[in-house]
Amino acid sequence: MQNSEENEVVQQFLDQVCRHIKVKKMHPEIREELTNHIEDRIEELQLRGSSKETAIHKAIEEMGSPDVIGKSINETHKPVLNWRIALIVATISLIGVIGAVSIDVSGSSPIPDLTARKTLQMGIGIIFLVCFYFFDYQKLKKYSDQVFFLLLFMNAFILINSPMINGVKGYVILGPFSINMLYSSVILLLLALAGMKPIKEMNWIHTILHTFYRVVIPLLILTYIGNSVLYGGIMYMTLYMMLMWLTKRNVKQFAIVTMIPTVALLYFTMPHFNTIKERFMQFLQPIEDNAYLQMKSMEAIRSAGWFGQGFASSNPGLGYVQSDSLFPYLIYCFGWIFGLITIILIGLFLGYLVQLLSKVKESYGRQLICVVLFFFTIRFAWPILMSFGFLPFVGMELPFIGYGGTNQWLDLSAIGLVLSIYRRKNMIPTAEFASSHLSSSKL
């Protein structure tokens, strides 16, 4: 504005509008956009012969009531809960509770009080979900580099010093809970990676150096030292490549940042070559002696029928019914229809996550959603496909449904993060402002 009188009049109008808008960070953008509308109208009125003072007052009058405009804009920028994702996660989790009760009643689980334990883990996970839902996820971005380094250091330290539990290292004991930091760190490292400097802003030397730091060293710790080929190797590498594709400068740069870690992954998995070969041979040539779990899983599904064998039915042939074999056990008890409904619910859940990518415009939030989407896609798809004999049988359970232990904390925390991103999608300043709210709020 060119003079103090005009500035004062317009500023009073803008102050009155913003008084009703609770999202403070949106105020600068809204004020700028409204000012542009007013200036354009002042210019039009002056071209028609109005004096500048008259044009100012007329333009503000035509904008409408500042109270109505402010309340209308505030409604647009209010936090929003994605009820579809919340309800479908609750429904899938309920399936897990039903499975735990059925296993408890049938006496099939080696874990005493499975239902009580699962309910406790879910309760803790829900607390994490709520905390992340109300937390401003954007505050995590500036600490991404520190979190990534801390996770690498913690994993290296824990793998060297932690005791072996069930043949696996990497556990942290916290009172009655044992947390597998190796598995938990995969998603945490990738979420931190999403907030770090994108490779498209790096020169070639920095690109190569950061490739070693961001993927080769994690692969060394998780796969070579931690003996986690599927989680620490394949899953981390797959999601890393997805993030690099989203943040690449060109295809040549993407080829460099994927070729180096691919060679490293192949080298780090060499000590596990015989085990991997044996697993695939069992998958390709499933006979009773070398593919017991796979054969029993497929047999349980075939014998289920449309409506299953009934609640709390026992199937001694299925091992790890509380985790790896829970999906075939659910089908065995409740039938093919129940299994189909579960698969449909999982498909809807993943589909809703995909839809979020078109609704969230902020790049950091989109990358976080991509990480969570691919993470859950792999962890849902593999246990289902291995139950039907389409993938090798490995130690992986369905999110929300399996007993999970502290994995449920991580899964529900990830959902809380996604819901937080959606909640704030209208609370983040963008390049454009929906001017349609102005016309609809005029008197």
Image: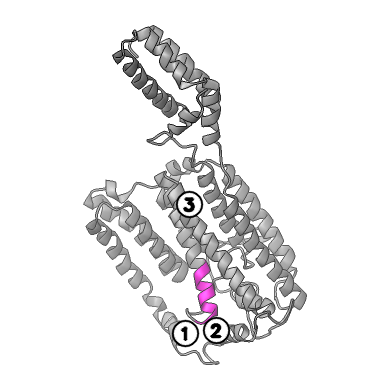
- Classify 10 Å Cα crowding around label 3: few (below 14), some (14-19), many (20 and above): many
Range drawn in magenta: 380-389
Mark 1 lies on a secondary structure that is helix
What is the image's colouring? one colour
Is residue 378 depicted above or below 211 in this figure? below
The residue that appears at 70% across and 75% down in the rendered structure is: 109
**What residue did someone put label 2 on?**
294
Q: Earlier in the sequence, mark 2 or mark 1?
A: 1
Q: Which amino acid type is shown beneath numbered disc 1?
A: Phe
Q: Which amino acid type is shown beneath numbered disc 2?
A: Gln
Of residues 363 and 432, the one drawn nearer to the viewer in this rendering: 432
Select label 3 or label 1 by which is in front: 3
Regarding residue 285, the answer to whether it shows in the image is yes
- Classify 10 Å Cα crowding around label 2: few (below 14), some (14-19), many (20 and above): many
Judge left or right: residue 153 versus residue 411.
Answer: left
Residues at badges 2 and 1 in contact (C-beta under 8 Å)? yes
- Distance from disc 3 to disc 2, alpha carbons, whole Å, reads 36 Å
- Distance from disc 2 to disc 1, alpha carbons, whole Å, reads 8 Å
**What residue did someone put label 3 on?**
356
The residue that appears at 70% across and 59% down in the rendered structure is: 120
Residue 283's tag is: 1
Q: Which of marks 3 and 1 is nearer the N terminus?
A: 1
Of residues 424 and 183, the one drawn nearer to the viewer in this rendering: 424
Mark 3 lies on a secondary structure that is helix
